[in-house]
Image (spheres, helix red, strand yellow):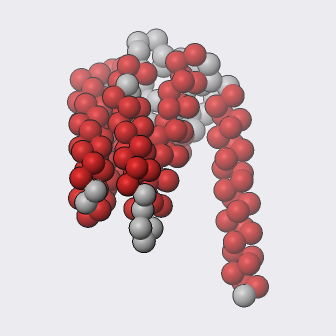
Amino acid sequence: MAATSTRFRLRLAALSLLVAGTAVAHEKATGIVAARMKAMEDTAAQAKALDRALKASSPDDADLRARAERIHALAHDLHAMFPPGSDQGHTYARPEIWTQRDGFQQLTRAYDAATERLVEAAGTRTLPALRQQFTVVRRHCLACHERFRTPGGERGY
């Protein structure tokens, strides 16, 4: 029991440091960079809540749909959050977003389409289909981050 309590406290401390570090990092960002960091943070929060809800024994259909719709709304505007010139200052975006624009646009469009299908799946109230589409959406997130986000979100400023 003591080992479990110690592990819990260590995890809680690590999470607290991560959250505090993210808040400090975001304070350095301004303009569109700060807006897109906030959008990414909101997307992550919605995805985590949706993941928890999908694991619940009887999730609330309205909550599932609302979270899927919010994720889609943020995904729909994603490409526009990276205009030319927004690669300066405090950002986790790799320069390849602007030098490989077609590849980035292709990934953001595919992600947008996947989140649209997530909303459709949430509307059917069929949990297996929703869970499957949520997995697809997460794969799109990871693919884009892998290619276009600085590993660990650190850029060495």
- The residue lying toward the viewer, choosing from 72 and 99, is 72
Compared with 122, 22 (above or below) is above
Which quadrant, please, contains the C terminus?
top right
The answer to which quarter of the image holds residue 59 is bottom left
Look at 48% across and 16% down and name the residue there.
Answer: 86
Compared with 112, 61 (above or below) is below
- The residue lying toward the viewer, choosing from 123 and 146, is 123
Q: Residue placed farthest to the top in the image?
A: 85
Look at 42% across and 37% down and name the residue there.
Answer: 70
Residue 44, horizontal then vertical, whole percent: 49, 45
Residue 123, horizontal then vertical, whole percent: 27, 48
Residue 45, horizontal then vertical, whole percent: 52, 46
Left or right, residue 35 beside residue 60: right
Compared with 126, 35 (above or below) is above
Look at 66% across and 34% down and name the residue there.
Answer: 25
Look at 41% across and 67% down and name the residue there.
Answer: 58
Can you see residue 55? Answer: no
Q: Residue placed farthest to the bottom in the image?
A: 1
Question: Total label count?
Answer: 0
Can you see residue 140? Answer: yes
Compared with 54, 45 (above or below) is above
The answer to which quarter of the image holds residue 50 is bottom left
Residue 48, horizontal then vertical, whole percent: 49, 53
Which quadrant, please, contains the N terminus?
bottom right
Left or right, residue 93 beside residue 19: left
